[in-house]
Image (tube, rainbow, N blue to C red):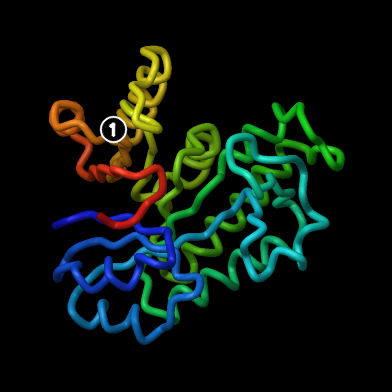
Amino acid sequence: MSLRYCFEEDYVKATLARSKPSDLAVIDSDGISKAVIQAAVSRGVMVYDYINAGALEKGRSYYDKYEHLRLARYEGWPDEYWIDPTADEWKRHCLDLARQAREKGAIGIYLDNTDIYYQARHIKKSLERDLPDQTEVYRALRSIVCGINDLGLIVMPNGGDAFVRRFYTEHPTVIKTINQEGCLFEDFKRQPKSERQYRTEYMDWARKKGMYVRGIEYCKKTRHIAECKAYYKLHGWKGLYISKHTDLRGD
């Protein structure tokens, strides 16, 4: 089984077209027709769709509708903002997106930025409104994850280890797979030892709890790719996607 991540609209159609039966394609379906996705699904391609649970991007069609929920700029990502997920309208929005993903043929959701749970206590710059209570943020994310699970979709959080660990204590069977970016390489640079150890510990914890562990590594050099493959095999992490671009194009 091949694993492909493609969040760039211009590349999604090609990524789905070259995915084979039983491959997993993790895509952002915004702007992609139901027909394109179901054509891949009909060939046996498994599709996960993207939902950003903790941040709002200016390029989204629904940006204006939720702009008032912005908390602060998302450092390192121009035109993206941490958002207050405790608002009922945002929780409904995330579940509406999940329903649309299911209708298009997705079997799972790549749930991004659940680390808003951590950030709700640590954002210090460019605040636009009072930070919500961290426990309320947890409860909001919990309701989103449980709601997606109730729709019959697999929930795969990307990062968000603090949230995932707490959620597991209450719902140990809901999250069956996790994704983590840049354990070894991020932006084509080797991670500092401390960061690698931190992410490794989380991914190992998830594996030991019975979760299927996937990861994205950003590197180009042959020896770095080989290093990633060996490291993932050593730790028993089953899914590895190497991105040779800073964005995800489904290579």
Q: Residue at x 14, y 26 (%)?
A: 223
Quarter-of-image position of residue 213:
top left
Give coordinates of residue 143: x percent, y percent: 61, 56
Report if residue 205 is visible in the image. Answer: no
Front residue of 15 and 202: 15
* Residue type indicated by callout 1: Lys
From what the image shows, is residue 29 above or below residue 3? below
Report if residue 165 is visible in the image. Answer: yes
Say left or right for 128 vs 210: right
Give coordinates of residue 118: x percent, y percent: 62, 32
Give coordinates of residue 97: x percent, y percent: 56, 70
Q: Which residue is mark 1?
A: 208
Q: Quadrant of the C terminus?
A: bottom left
Q: Residue at x 26, y 45 (%)?
A: 241
Say left or right for 228 vs 210: left
From what the image shows, is residue 129 above or below residue 196? below
Q: Residue at x 73, y 44 (%)?
A: 136
Dot 1 falls on a residue whose secondary structure is helix
Q: Residue at x 38, y 31 (%)?
A: 186
Say left or right for 198 vs 79: left
Quarter-of-image position of residue 16:
bottom left
